[in-house]
Image (tube, rainbow, N blue to C red):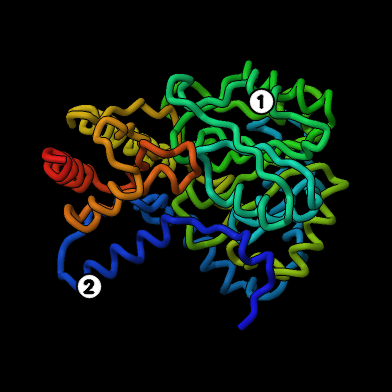
Amino acid sequence: MRLAQRMSKLGTETAFEVLARAKQLEREKKIEVIHLEIGEPDFDTPKNIKDSAIKAINQGYTHYTPSAGLMEVREVIAHEVSRTRNIKVTAENVVITPGGKPVIFLPILALVDEGDEVIYPNPGYPIYESVINFVGAKSVPIQLREENEFRLDTEELKSLVTDKTRMIIINSPQNPTGGMLTQKDLETIAQICISKDIIVLADEIYSRIIYEGEHHSIASVPGMPERTIILDGLSKTFAMTGWRLGYGVMNKELAPYIAKLVTNSASCTASFTQMATIEALTGPQDDVDKMVEEFRKRREVTISGLNDIPRISCKTPKGAFYAFPNVKEIGWESKKLADYLLEEAGVAVLSGTSFGKYGQGYLRISYANSVENIKKGLERIKEAVKDL
């Protein structure tokens, strides 16, 4: 079969590949693998949200909806974003999508031409670079450095901007490092974008999972609401990864074009998951608060355990649920080390290079697992690297 040439430019998300390999090892070798690779809360979806979805199904919410989403749900999202970002958002600014990834894919498809440049964080979520390359644009990485708490350097950002820069992607709290941008960072980025008329894709999917400080959105900076596309959704905050409910908040002139792309690709997002969104955003938030507190405890166990392993060090992440330990002193390439830990120690982690070339020398560890399993996994890592 002859594939279109563009397929050679498409990347992947390594977490799913490692998960599949780990599951295969469990089946074939009958061993226990400690799963620290997948970025998915291990909590159940709150009962009130599940009940609301079941109620919606029984009420007949099982059919097509408008491609941008049900108006009553878009209004609830608009109200929530207006409240949390302190900006004026209406339903016209909201497009509901099946998961958060379409809010990466579709705006890049709609706004970025072949030959345009897009600046994105590296190490960073791999789908950014994948989609930029897929549309024939030039992917321009900005390195996130450990010594800068994995925040992008705004002076370096200025040097990367050219007349061809069409979009800048930011992610805070950040996957894979847990780093967070400051208000000052965002204001500087905003100045650059306003002066050069650049669109910002702000991935804020982890905005509720924060342990230190508070979340700041670049959309809140004067002059930026019309230049910002906010990516958010229910997957991480409400442990709803399988429900596939994401949304984009954007300039109301852009929203119909993104909705048209939804029409051409997925038709719409499942109607009963949309209705469950109303309960998720307006109902009790106790389960979210409990989940974040549990992640906070796991973070302490994870970071303490990693820093107790000779030749491994790790900064304390401010948000999300990932640790990004520095393993350079071990002397192995990240991918080789990650493979070794899976095959020889039964611990599934991700190579830092799964998130771009600047992830070399690091691993990503998800602490979306029990404290017991985290401790067990870290002990296995400690033993496995002892003689390397």
User: Residue 27 has which mark?
Assistant: 2
227 relative to 340, above or below: above
Q: Quadrant of residue 298?
A: top left
Q: Residue 101 location in percent, x, y?
A: 60, 55
Q: Nearer the viewer, residue 280 or 379?
A: 379
Residue 106 falls left or right of residue 238 = right
**Residue at numbered disc 1:** 157
Find numbered disc 1 in the image and state the secondary structure of the residue it sits on.
Answer: helix
Q: Quadrant of the N terminus?
A: bottom right
Give the alpha-carbon distance from disc 2 to disc 1, as whole Å.
46 Å
> Residue at (74%, 29%) from the top-left corner?
161
Relative depth, front residue between 325 and 262: 325
User: Along the horizontal axis of the image, is 339 left or right of 113?
Assistant: left
Residue at (28% x, 46% y) in the render: 337
Q: Amino acid at mark 2?
A: Arg
Secondary structure, mark 2, is helix
Residue 349 in percent (x, y) is at 31, 49
